[in-house]
Image (tube, grey):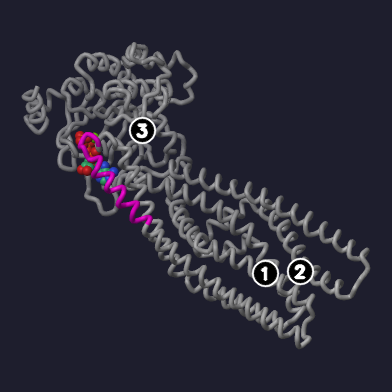
Amino acid sequence: MFKKLLGRIKNPGIKLMVERIQAEEKQVKKVFIITLFGSVLGAFVPLMYGKIIRMAGDKVSSVEYIILFVLMWLTVDQVRNWTTRYSDRQGVYTSWNVDYNLFMDSLAHLIRLPMSYLSEQRLGKTVQRVERGADSLGRMIRDVLFSLVPHFLSLAFYFAFMFWIQWQLGVLVFMTVVLYAVAMTSSNKKIVALNRENRKTWEAAWGHMWDVTSNIKAVKANTNEEFEIKRIRDNFDKCYSKEKEAQDLRNRIQAFEHFIFGGGSVITIALGALMLRWEMIDAGGLFSFLGYIQLAYTPFSRLAHNWRFVLETLVIEERVAKFLEEKEEDYESGEEAQVVGDVEFCDVSFKYGESGNEIFRNINLTIGEGETVAIVGESGVGKTTLIDLISRYHEPTGGRITIGGVDIRCWKRESLRSQIAIVPQDVSLLNDTIKLNIAYGDIGKISDEALIEDAAKASYAHNFIIGERFVNGYNQVVGERGVKLSAGQKQRVAIARALLRNPKILILDEATSALDSESEMYVQQALEVLIKSRTTLIIAHRLSTIKKADKIIVMHDGGIAEIGKHEELMARNGIYKKLVDLQSFQE
Ligand SMILES: Nc1ncnc2c1ncn2[C@@H]1O[C@H](COP(=O)(O)OP(=O)(O)OP(=O)(O)O)[C@@H](O)[C@H]1O
Ligand SMILES: [Mg+2]
């Protein structure tokens, strides 16, 4: 049933909903059947009421009367009650399943997206979107699908009984319902457009809020608390006023519902009473009929109550579907990486995004296996970008990068990255224990405390970890992004992490920049051990780090201006010498 349906659906939001419901098909069918059974059973109730009234008129024996009551009590009260309770409970569980699965899938998707997507987005906005998407879909299944669809399906029964009792009155009720359905769907466009706008406003507000809280220190340092509070308030004010607009629309729809159904009921009752006089219907029949009107209107008025929610969910799921369509970073395909041999850049060009400027063009470069290569150049020239290409965070827009002669695009990203360790410019730690943060370089080693401690010792982090200020030692929690550590401490934790990873290629992006002279000396020693056995790329401003490099690469103006050893480059009297002179002068 679902497969055929899925093929025809164009709207991505509806498609997503159907797919997610399909995943719970068995459970959904069960709840449907039970609920449908309950409402079909309920369809006999008005008929029985009519029968009782007729029996009272016909002066039947009290035994028959009692039997009828017992029968009604059994069917109506007990069985129906049971079906309602069962489907309510199962409905809630199923909706939770759908909610949970969509939420988990979306979060996993978010983490698997490439850096190129993630650095463009406000994450708070995205997280809000997937959270709402999962929550709304769950509610939709519970409040609309399970509590309404079976009732709509049993409408056919209600109408069959109505037509059977008095077909002219049946036609009248049918027309009321059709008129109502047409009126309701005609307001869709407006509501959907309003909802789309609403969602965007909410996401933008949360995106900004997230941005502010994750940069709270900068906010305070620049005394911009009030400025940000005002911006947050303005953003959310916009959300609430848009919500008010949507609520007004909903109220109007509800008023309309009352008007049509109220009018329809009055006309039917009046006409029914006249028919009673003309003997076109008897009292029992009219009584049953009124019961059926009630039954037939209920799903519609409940739908009206949920209508805005249904359309809103549609818009939300549309946005979730769009997010889920974003291409994930491909970790799996390709061969296992064989990181042996020289790293070569052949005619590599790169720019961020389609419309960005070229950061560099036609870079040709060989980094010999086991060599230590330093990259220097003014800020913003593209040093970090260049090394990011080796880990495939971004793909070159032209040319290729090879390791041991093999294009790195042939390899699994996961396998390639597992052999590279980066001590980045801005070390980011998780709000967890120091132990976990060190073990993060090779998470499989988390329970091997001796190894973690060795790495910490080699990176000169051990001393501060077991020092007085760290009450919990290796189990000390480091705070949001590591705020409870100094910059130098963070850097040493990052170096320990790299040590534990034991990579083939090591990348140090200004790795010693945040250290005082003494720590720097220690860390230098630690790094020397680390560097010795592997290919190392160092981005550094500090001369002391660079001098020992096998090769120095000077980047300038989108290309490589000079390559050579320190002495050679000094003798050349070019850009490198200028950089060195400038630094010596500053020191
Ligand atoms: N995610 C990004 N999207 C768009 N442009 C970016 C992005 N990251 C960096 N850039 C731009 O690319 C250029 C090179 O940046 P990169 O970080 O590689 O410089 P860098 O040489 O490492 O500088 P620094 O010495 O200051 O660290 C800069 O002009 C920067 O504005
Ligand atoms: Mg950089």
Dot 3 or dot 2, earlier in sequence: 2
Magenta highlight range: 220-240
Residue 469 placement: quadrant: top left
Q: For mark 3, what is the residue?
A: 404
Q: Is residue 279 left or right of residue 474?
A: right
**Circle 2 is placed at which residue position?**
46
Of the pair 121 and 420, the residue shown nearer to us: 121
Q: Residue at x 60, y 54 (%)?
A: 142
Q: Position of residue 258 (x, y in %)?
A: 55, 71
Q: Nearer the viewer, mark 3 or mark 2?
A: 2
Q: Disc 1 or 2, which lies upstream in sequence?
A: 2
Q: Is residue 100 visible?
A: yes
Residue at x 42% of width, y 30% of height: 418
Earlier residue among tags 1 and 3? 1
SS of the residue under disc 2: helix
Q: Main secondary structure of the magenta part?
A: helix
On the image, the x and y values in percent for residue 266 come to 63, 78
Question: What's the distance in space between the residues labelled 1 and 3, CA to CA?
Answer: 78 Å
Crowding at mark 3 (Cα within 10 Å: few <14, some 14-19, many 20+):
some
Residue 428 point in image, percent of width and height: 33, 30
- Residue 249, by quadrant, is bottom left
Q: Which mark is residue 283?
A: none
Task: Note whether ligand 1 is within 8 Å of mark 2.
Answer: no
Residues under numbered marks 1 and 2 in contact, where contact means CB atoms less than 8 Å apart:
yes
The stretch drawn in magenta includes residue 230:
yes
| Quadrant hosting ligand 1 | top left
Q: Is ligand 1 closer than 8 angstroms to the Cβ of mark 3?
A: no
Q: Quick one: 224 or 557, which is closer to the camera? A: 224
Name the residue beneath numbered marker 1: 294
Q: Amino acid at mark 1?
A: Gln
